[in-house]
Amino acid sequence: MWKRKIIWPITWVPILRSSFNFAKDALLHLLLPRTCYACGKDLPFRAEDPLCAACAAQVRFVADGLYCRRCGQPLRQGGAHCFHCRGSKSKKYPCAYIRSAVVFNPQVRALVHPFKYAHQTYLAAYLGGWLGQAWPDFDVLHTAQLLMPVPLYPAKQKKRGYNQAALLARQLGRITGLMVDENNLCRIRNTPSQTGFGREQRAENMKGAFVCRQPEAVKGKVVLLIDDVATTGATLEACAAALKQAGAKQVMAYTLARDV
Ligand SMILES: [Zn+2]
Ligand SMILES: [Zn+2]
C-alpha cells in the first residue's frame, strides 16, 4: 500500500521561520529602507553595515599612516613623535601610550554622534569591530591586563542611560579576552564641554576630575583606558593620573577615533 511520507513539523519550523523573516525584511526594505548614516543613500537589501560601501571606503585607520609613537596623533610629516611628545616632554604624561583605531572624519562622526547622543547603542558592535580590526597593529597595548572605560559624570550617565565608552570596552573585552572593570574609575566633577578649548585649557579643565575607588584592583597592573574619541588626550591623561596615583604600574589608552 502507498504510504505518505511524514515530514515532522519540527523540520518545517526553521524553514517557515526563515521565509517569514525574509518576507518581513523585504516588506520593511520596501516601506522603510535603511539608509547610510553618513550620506543618507538607501542601503542594499539586508545590508548589515550602517555605512554604504562608498562611505565605508572613506574610513581611515590611523595605523595605515604616520602617527606619534607616544600620543597616537596622526603626523603630517615623518618623525617618531609629535611636537608635544618630542624629547623628554613625553615623560610628563601619565598615560604611556595613546592609540586610536580610526581618524575622526565626517563618516566616523556620522556613526559616533548617534551612538553617543541618540541611543543608537546597537552601533557598538560595528564600531567595536574597528577596535578589534586595528588591535593587532598596536603591539604596545598588548601588555594590558585590564580594560577601563572612561566614566561619565554619574548624573550625565543616568540621563543618557548608558556610557558609550563602556559599550566599546565590552566589545574589545570580548575580542581580546581582557577583563573590563567598569565601576572602579569615577568622574567626581562634571566638567564643562571642552569644545573650543585649547590644549592647556583642556588639561586644566580635566585636572582632578577622576578618582579610583578601589586602588587594590589596579595596584601593580597595566591598565588600558577605553574611550570613543580622543582630541588632545586631556581626559585620558586625567584618568591615567588618578590610576597611577592608585598604584597602577602603567596606564595606556585606546580610543575608537582620533580627532585631528
Ligand atoms: Zn554612504
Ligand atoms: Zn604625541
Image (tube, rainbow, N blue to C red):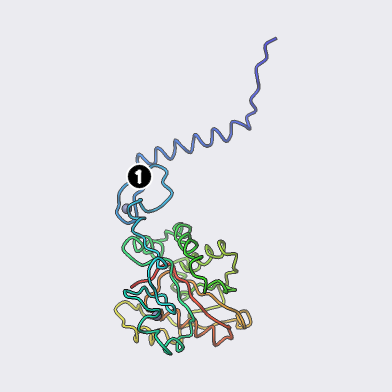
Q: Which quarter of the rendered image does ligand 2 occupy?
A: bottom left
What residue lies at 35% left-to-right and 44% top-to-bottom? 32
Around disc 1, counting alpha carbons within 10 Å, would you say few (fewer than 14), some (14 to 19), or many (20 or more)?
A: some
- Furthest toward the top, the residue is 1
Q: Name the spot of residue 31 as percent of width and height, x first.
A: 35, 40
What residue lies at 44% left-to-right and 79% top-to-bottom? 70
Q: Name the spot of residue 128 as percent of width and height, x first.
A: 48, 61
Q: Name the spot of residue 82 as percent of width and height, x first.
A: 37, 80
Task: Give the residue at mark 1.
Answer: 33
- Is residue 188 something that shows in the picture? no
What residue lies at 47% left-to-right and 78% top-to-bottom? 97
Q: Is residue 32 above or below residue 102?
A: above
What residue lies at 62% left-to-right and 83% top-to-bottom? 220
**Nearest to the observer: residue 105 or residue 83:** 83
Q: Is residue 5 above or below residue 156?
A: above
User: Would you identify the image quadrant in which residue 209 lies?
Assistant: bottom left
**Nearest to the observer: residue 52 or residue 239:** 52
- Furthest toward the right, the residue is 1
Q: Name the spot of residue 206 as percent of width and height, x first.
A: 41, 84
- The total number of labels drawn is 1
Q: Is residue 127 above or below residue 76?
A: above
